[in-house]
Image (cartoon, grey):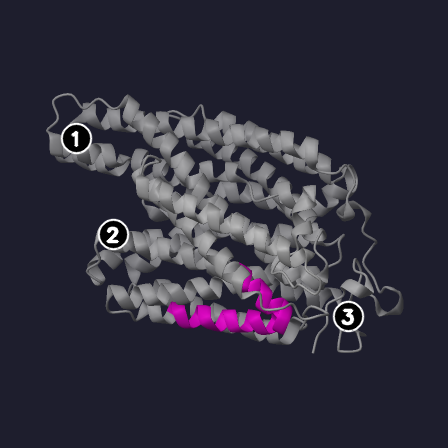
Amino acid sequence: MTAVLGDAFAPVAVSGTRKWWALGALGLAGLAVGVDGTVLSVALPTLAKALHASESDLQWFSSGYFLVLAAAMLPAGLLGDRYGRKKVLLASLGVFGIGSAACAYSTSVAEFLAARVLIGLGGAGLIVMAFSVLTVLFSQQERPKAVGVMAGVTFVAFPIGPILGGWLLSSYWWGWVFLINVPVVVVSLAAVVALVPESRATERPGLDLVGVVFSAGGLVAVTYGLIQAGQDGWSDIGALALMITGVALLVGFFAWERRLTRRPGGQPLIDLSLFSSASFTWVVPILAMLGILFTMPQYFQGVLGANAMGSGLRLLPLVAGLVAGAVPAARVVRLVGAKVAVTAGFVLLAAGLFTGAMTGVGSSGLFVGMWMALAGLGTGIAMATAMSAALVELSADKSGVGAAVLQAVNKIGGPFGIAVLGSVLSAGYLARLDLSGLPAAAAATVRQSVFGGVAVAQKIHSAALLASVRTAFVHGMDLALAVSAGIAVVGVVLTVVFLPASNATEKAVPPGPAPDGEAVGTRPAAASRAR
């Protein structure tokens, strides 16, 4: 592959080995971000004691991170396109490392929250720039494989977080849960400096401050509203008000961007033509997967009695399936085309989830592992191909903001999916509980969660209540998995109807030097410029 670098677009060869090593560096940094999000859930009980944190404080440790992450996505993309993606990536890595160290040495709730804000800022820039750089490093034909590697890294973080966190918390000082990110950041910084070429937009985009404020405010309000709805229910007035305000701000944002697009010389924050692409609009991270990631750790710990590390180990079949589907995604696309590959991925995912919805309290580990592996396989094929199809729509010139839009949709989808599936699980759980003869205070604790129910049942030595709690939770879990399967079926329909039968992913030329120093899979007008 040839990357176009330098003010005069002089071709500078980026060898196949070098760019894959660069992808490894990006994947390592992305793994640190993913593990940081999952390891926090394991560390919350320890943090509550060490920092004297209340239940509300603990919620903000997680929610604050997601809010900053959502708010910083589009500004990070704009900064990368304007000033240089490598510069923003290096700065983001530095901020992420500083935030991680600050978390480890925090002595109060305020200090820890401030450190989480730094991690969120660094994580936003890191995630956006990592996917943006893929459009510069890899040809259209190679992107499915590269995206598959990044997607696999993202999902590997889910079991690694609890496993690593459980081991560190049980053996060492709690601060190592966060300090472990620092050497990863140092290695990633060195690798990015040595392997990743600098690139930015050919023409520097303007600083659309109105767009930044409206988009950030809207994303924060919607995300926070969804988090609140997941915690307090969809009837909560505060959550609904936040979501309505956020949607209004985002509508205002798109109206403003449309106005700038039509104005001669206007420089909008995002290219609205991105949303006219079926690949970009409909091919988004798969909400259906949240059914597994949200419910199964609770099932493993609350119903089966596993600890955090054991729960992470039980997620390995899901990760194995995901990797098995994501890594060869590029070859699958070449054989059957992107539309067929994404459709098949959704079908496998739906089949796995529908099977999972038949899980019972006494289901074997083999049964659970098999349907999770099937769902992971489908997710790997669909996600790698779908995200690659979306990235192909981005010119290297607009890859920063374009990747930011894709990731912003992803970050909203997470809280939305958890809020919806959490409501379904809670409704199913409460509908099957038998709380007859239980004191009001104990009954309230049981209603809160399966963990509260198990704790009460064990405290009063009631085998009947314990059985009721576990059966009720599995009923709610099965409903949530069935809803997730329904979402996967909707994905099948949307793919069949909207995803083009032939797209740039399938038409990409083979990797290799292009004439006149042109980057493979790009045109001179869309090439990224480096300084």
In the rendered image, residue 506 lying in the magenta stretch gets the answer no
Q: Amino acid at mark 3?
A: Val
Element under disc 2: helix
Quadrant in the picture for the N terminus: bottom right
Q: The C terminus appears in which quarter of the rendering?
A: bottom right
Q: Residue furthest right?
A: 515
The residue tagged 1 is 443
Q: Which mark is residue 381?
A: none
Q: Which residues are magenta?
A: 74-100
Image point (36%, 28%), residue name:
476
Between 46 and 168, the one nearer to me in the picture: 46
Q: Position of residue 384 (x, y in %)?
A: 64, 46
Which residue is nearer to you in this view: 432 or 465?
432
Residue placed under numbered mark 3 in the picture: 4
Residue closer to the observer: 344 or 202: 202
Q: State the residue at coordinates (39%, 69%).
A: 99
Question: Taking 30 as reference, is 303 above or below it?
Answer: above
